Amino acid sequence: MLPPPRTKIEEKKQKEFYKQKIRDAWNIVDIHNTGVQSKKEISYIMRYLNQFPSEAQVRSEILKAIEEDEPSDNIKYEKFEPKMIEWLMKNQFKVATHEELLAAFKLLDPENKGYIPENVMKNLLMDCGIKFDEKIYESFKSFAVNKTDDNVYYEDYIARLIEENDSHLYSQIKDYENFQCP
């Protein structure tokens, strides 16, 4: 998210900034201030923090790194924060590039029509691989599906996705520029 720190002072500032951002992201989901999150929420928190692991990475690497010794359906903030700082400092789970996203969509569009029908996307996202739940799918649908013909025009979708991510990243960088290290 941020460029690598050049000095120890800059490293300390970045870590403190990340701690604040991690806490802010966690609190969006932890509305009852329990300090515990469902494993299902971890990937959403990470994406809010501009880290974009695949769901397979979340399941095979990330959850294993932050789980307690006794596995449960929940993750404690105290286990999550230090690993998240590490991942942010390394920018370990970068967002896919335009080219990577386009190549993935083109695999779904062998006829090169420039779109994927909504019912095909729904089937893929709800029934194949790591499945979306209904709430997440509806969020995707409202963002990605053209309302006039129920297609996902993937070049438009990718552009919107990148624009939204860039806007969020810009906001985070501005926050960092104004951040005062305690």
Image (tube, rainbow, N blue to C red):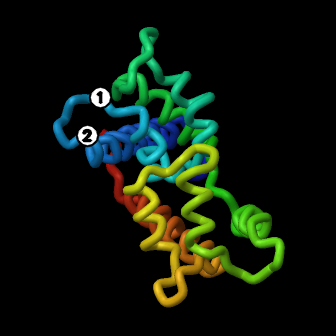
User: Label 1 belongs to which residue?
Assistant: 36
**Looking at the picture, does residue 61 appear above or below residue 97?**
above
Amino acid found under the numbered disc labelled 2: Asp
Q: Position of residue 173 (x, y in %)?
A: 46, 60
Q: Give residue 100's position: percent from left, percent from top.
A: 75, 62
Query: What amino acid type should be assigned to the residue bearing mark 1?
Result: Val
Left or right: residue 180 compared with residue 42: left
Category of crowding for the residue at label 2, using alpha-carbon neighbours closer than 10 angstroms: few (below 14), some (14–19), many (at least 20): some
Q: In this view of the protein, which residue sits in the foreground, 3 or 164?
A: 164
Q: Residue at x 37, y 56 (%)?
A: 135
Rendered location of residue 131, percent (x, y): 54, 47
- In the foreground, 23 or 158: 158
Identify whether 50 is placed above or below 154.
Answer: above
> Is residue 99 something one can see in this rendering?
no
How far apart are the alpha carbons under marks 1 and 2?
7 Å
Give left or right: position of 72 versus 34: right
Determine the image quadrant of residue 41.
Answer: top left
Q: Which residue is mark 2?
A: 30
Could one spot residue 15 in this view of the protein? yes
The image quarter containing residue 117 is: bottom right
Question: Of marks 1 and 2, which one's residue comes earlier in the chain?
Answer: 2
Q: Residue at x 58, y 42 (%)?
A: 55
| Pointers 1 and 2 in contact (C-beta within 8 Å) | yes
